[in-house]
Amino acid sequence: MTTTTKSPDRFAAVLERLTQKSVNDHYNPYTHFDWPDSLPEEAYWMSPSLLSIHGTELESELTEAQKMALSKWESINFYSMNVHGIRELLTEVIDRIHTRGFEEASEFFHHFIGEENEHMWFFAEFCLRYGGKLYSTLRLKGESEQQSDLANFLVFSRILLFEELVDHYNTTMANDELLHDTIREINRVHHRDESRHIAFGRELVSMLYERARPAMTEQQRGEVESYLKDYIAVILNSFCSSVVYRDAGLGHIAGLRSRVLAHPGRKAAVKLAVRKPMGFFVKQGIFTDHTIPGL
């Protein structure tokens, strides 16, 4: 376990660099994307390696057409998760912009809020245009907390974990030539913006942990680790949905969700998705190891 101390000068320099990059990379999402009337049904909408069945025997048991149908509805589920996750993180950031303790970060928060609002729009547009709906999702937000140092640390840790997990999917799909250009572009643009948000989030989480850690007991540190790891597990398990399986025409397979969640191949696939954030949280001394409940 290692911990690092972030200097105020370093944080200020990172903020200045990321804020300028937000200005330089600015685009209009309402005119940027090409929205065809429909996307081909006989094609993958999500990279095969990202499907919930990847690494399980179902990968070979299902026909190509069945896997393509599953990829459509799992992609709609993924973008729906983004819509709901973004709405919740926006609420938390707006609650803290221009408040005590976040004076220096507030300038970047303005860019963050604007960009995340745009992301929420184009993910919702994709779902409604090509899926006809948004899936509901498990609430990923923690209980309402007072804005203590610990509460602020937990809020931005959840935001960072969510963004890093999503980015694994974005980078994979942006580079996958199996996918339609519109799908690849949505993921490419989101990854470009999220790379700034993740860089900012890592600096902020590290700083907030240093601020909160002195007042935490050993028991509290263990509770924080368990809480955040449970949060990761909730996100990962949300990728497996009985409603999605039914929409994909797989509702006749008894116990499909439980089967997938318990399969060792699925567990190996999701560990790949979380390797970067887990490495960061272990390096900062926030986590003691790379284990996640149930994985």
Image (tube, rainbow, N blue to C red):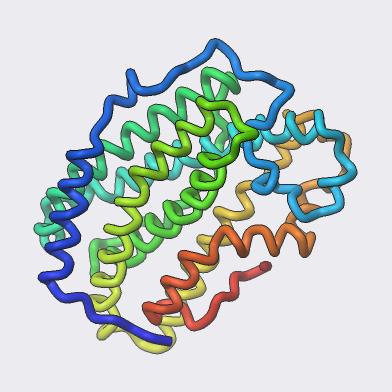
Q: Is residue 117 left or right of residue 52?
A: left
Q: Where does residue 15 sit, x and y in percent of width and height?
A: 17, 57
On screen, 130 above or below 171?
A: above
For the N terminus, give its image quadrant: bottom left
Say which residue appears at 77% left-offset and 64% top-offset: 264
Figure disc tally: 0
Q: Residue extending furthest top?
A: 37
Which residue is at the front of the view, 168 or 145?
168
Say which residue appears at 52% left-offset and 21% top-offset: 128
Which residue is at the front of the view, 211 or 270?
270
Say which residue appears at 56% left-offset and 23% top-offset: 133
Rendered image quadrant of residue 160? bottom left
On screen, 171 above or below 264?
A: above
For the C terminus, give its image quadrant: bottom right
On screen, 155 above or below 24?
A: below
Rendered image quadrant of residue 60? top right
Q: Residue extending furthest front?
A: 177
On screen, 251 above or below 258?
A: above
Q: In this view, does 105 lie to the left or right of 53?
A: left
Which residue is at the front of the view, 184 or 99?
184
Q: Where does residue 203 sit, x and y in percent of width and height?
A: 27, 66
Q: Where does residue 148 sit, x and y in percent of width and height?
A: 24, 68
Q: Where does residue 278 sit, x and y in percent of width and height?
A: 49, 69
